[in-house]
Image: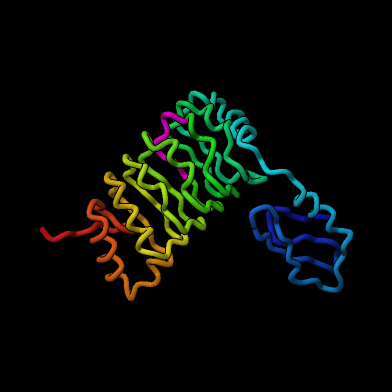
Amino acid sequence: MIRAINHKYISVSPCCCLQFDFIMTLNVIKLIVIETANSTYLANFINVNKIMALKPTTCKEAIARWEKLKGEVAAEATVIELQFQWPPIEKMDGALSTLVACEKLSLSSNMIDKIAGIAGMRSLKILSLGRNYIKSLSGIETVADTLEELWISYNPIDKLKGVGALKNLRVLYMSNNMIKEWVEFNRLQECTSLRDLVFIGNPLCDNQPDVDTWRTQASNRLQQITKLDGIPIVRET
């Protein structure tokens, strides 16, 4: 019997307790059995297998949940929060384009692997996609005319191709991604409206000799920014 599904322990008998962790990958939740008191009761994994077999939440389903929770019409709302869906959202799809009035959309902490389905979001100003599995910025250009803030930290992005299309982008939070080369960082020079950048936790930043070197290099390359990693930049006049 599962004692508490939201915790790390499953009670399978009075003398046996399984401790497990869920490790999220693109399409699977891996169950690791760390400890058993006497023996592993395989029959009791049936409940866990049911969890693992759940289909991912679609954007349409997540929007419907939001409408039921908020008692609002999503197509008329300016702020839509679809983060932490269970089962997680894996694909951004065309259902998002129905959110024509949305100015801020949060899809963080899901299992999304690419940006898509937002071409119809003509009012979008803030897009939150942190803690997903997004590998590139492809697809973001469809909201380039309106997007002012992109929150996309904790993703495996290693290239910034296409970021130059975001001419109105003022805020970019993309810490803990996989940018390794200055040539990719320099693409941000094309974002002429950019003022606030969070980039800490990328290999490029971590590989600098010290924080001062990083800040000097980054601020010299991006003359338009006024804040780096949460700290204002003081420039000599």
Q: Which range is magenta?
A: 121-128
Above or below: residue 232 compared with residue 106: below
210 vs 119, left or right, is left
**Would you place residue 236 above or below residue 47 in this image?**
below
Asked where in the image residue 214 lies, by quadrant, the reply is bottom left
Where residue 103 sits: x, y (%)? 42, 33
Is residue 122 covered in magenta? yes
- Identity of the residue drawn at 47% across and 59% down: 158
| Quadrant the N terminus occupies | bottom right
Residue 112 drawn at (x, y percent): 58, 47
Percent x, y for residue 65?
A: 62, 33
Name which residue lies at 48% across and 32% down.
Answer: 119
Q: Residue at x 86, y 71 (%)?
A: 39
- Magenta stretch contains residue 66: no
Question: 58 and 119: which one is in front?
Answer: 119
Q: Quadrant of the C terminus?
A: bottom left
As drawn, the residue found furthest toward the right would be 43
Q: Is residue 144 above or below residue 227?
A: above
Secondary structure mostly taken by the magenta-highlighted segment of the chain: loop
Single out the residue that lies furthest toward the bottom: 209
Which picture quadrant has residue 9?
bottom right
Q: How many marks?
A: 0
Rendered residue at 55%/30% (across/down): 70
Locate residue 56 relative to residue 40 in the image: left or right. Answer: left
> Can you give x and y, in whole percent of width and height, for residue 8 in the image?
70, 61
